[in-house]
Image (cartoon, helix red, strand yellow):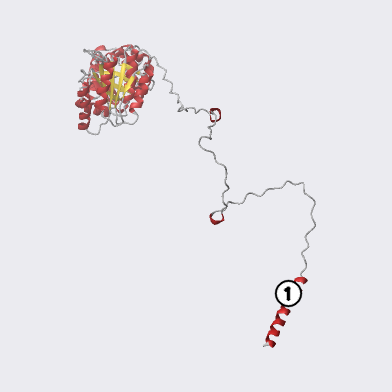
Amino acid sequence: MELILAVVIALVVAVAVTSGLVISGRKKKQLPPAEPPSTTPTITAPPAEPHVGEEAETPREEPRRTVEEVTLPADEAVGTPVAVEDPVVAEPAAPEIEIPEPTAGRLVRLRARLARSQNSLGKGLLTLLSREHLDEDTWEEIEETLLTADVGVAPTQELVERLRERVRVLGTRTPDELRGLLREELVTLLDPELDRTVHTESPTDVPGVVMVVGVNGTGKTTTTGKLARVLVADGKSVVLGAADTFRAAAADQLQTWGERVGARTVRGPEGGDPASIAFDAVKEGIAEGADVVLIDTAGRLHTKTGLMDELGKVKRVVEKHGPLDEILLVLDATTGQNGLTQARVFAEVVDITGIVLTKLDGTAKGGIVIAVQRELGVPVKLIGLGEGPDDLAPFEPGAFVDALIGD
C-alpha cells in the first residue's frame, strides 16, 4: 500500500516538473517598434449595427419633459400654410368673327370657274350649231352632247326640237345669232319663273326654320355652314341645330362653321336622338329671338323606311313650334344620274322645297341642273362652286347659262 502511494506521488511530481519546463521554454512575442505619429486624419469606422434580441443594449435613462414643459415652435419657423390653387388653364381665344361676302353677284364672280368646267357643253353645242350643213348626224351629235352633260332624255329631246325649228326658220346663222338662240332655249329649260328665294320669314313669331337633308358625302354639313354665312351676309341672326348625330365629328364641323360667323350651335351626344336636338335648336332660336334656325339632319340612306321614319319624326317635332319654311335637298353634281335616284327617295320621304347642287365646278355635267328640276318639279336655289367659305351662290338661270356658253 505504501508502495502504491509512493508511485502516485512520484508520477504527480514528474508531471509538474514537465509542465514547468514547457512554460519556461516559451519565448515572449516581440512587439514591432512603435511608429511615429501620422499626420493623416483618422477615419472613424461607422458605428456598429444595433444589436437586437438578447444582444440589445439596455436603454439609458434620459430626463423626460412633461406636456406642459413642451413649447410649440414659433410661426416664423413653421411658416403659415399657403393654399395652392389648381393651375389655371387659359381658355382658347374665341375665334374672330368673320364678315361674309355679300351674296349679290357671287355667281357672277364665280362665272369663270363654272365656265372652265362646263366648256365642253356650251362650246361643244355652239361648234356643232355653227357647221355649214346641219344634217341628221350633226343633230344626233348635239343630242349626244346634251345627254352626256346629264340634261336628261326628255329635256334633251325638247331642246333639240326647238333648236331645229328655230334654225330652220332663222335661215342665216351668224355666231352671235346662234349664241343668242342657244341662250334663250337653255334659259327656257331652266324655267326662270320658278321662285328661287330661300324662304326664312316665318308667318308667326318664331324663327324661320330650314331643314337640310341629303346623303352623307354630298357636302351637306358644309353646305349648312355655308348657308349660315349666306344668311348672316344678308343681315340675319342664325342658330344651328346639329341633328346629324350618327356621323363622327359632324357636330364639331358644324359648330366650327357657326363660330366663324357668330352663330350658336345646339348639339347633343353622339348617336343621340336627332328629333330631340332639332326641337331644342328651335326652342333656343325662339328664346334668343333669332331670325333663322338651320337644322343639319343625318344623311343615312340604308333603307327608305328608316329614312322616312327618322326625317318624318324630325319634321313632326319641329312643327310643334311652327311650320317648316324650307326643306333643302343637297345633291352632289358629280354623281349625275345617281343623284337623281337619291333625289327621288328623299322627295318621297319629305316635301322638298328647293335643291342645292354642290361641286358643280368639278364636273362637265352641268345639265344635271335641268334634269333635277324636271325630275322633282322644284327649283335649284343654291349652287356650290368651290371649297371656299363663300363659294355657295344663289342660282341665277341667266348667269348660269352665260357661264356655260361664254361670251
Where residue 287 appears, as percent x and y from the top left, is 27, 16
Mark 1 highlights which residue? Answer: 19
- Does residue 45 lie above or below 223 as drawn? below
- Residue shown at the point (80%, 57%) measured from the top left: 33
- Residue shown at the point (57%, 42%) measured from the top left: 63
Which quarter of the rendered picture does the C terminus lie within? top left
In the rendered picture of this protein, how many numbered marks are placed on residues? 1
Where residue 325 appears, as percent x and y from the top left, is 23, 17
Which quarter of the rendered picture does the N terminus lie within? bottom right
Q: Which residue lies most toward the front here?
A: 2
- Does residue 197 lie above or below 1 as drawn? above
Quadrant in the rendering for residue 24: bottom right
Where residue 148 appears, as percent x and y from the top left, is 29, 26
Viewer-proximal residue among 43 and 366: 43
Tag 1: Cα neighbours inside 10 Å, few (<14), some, or many (≥20)? few
- Residue shown at the point (72%, 78%) measured from the top left: 15
Quadrant in the rendering for residue 178: top left
Quadrant in the rendering for residue 313: top left
- Does residue 243 lie above or below 232 as drawn? below
Q: Can I make out residue 257 in this image? A: yes
Where residue 129 appears, as percent x and y from the top left, is 30, 18
Viewer-proximal residue among 232 and 346: 232
Q: Is residue 33 shown left or right of residue 103?
A: right
Judging from the image, what secondary structure is the residue with disc 1 in? helix
- Residue shown at the point (49%, 27%) measured from the top left: 82
Q: Amino acid at mark 1?
A: Ser
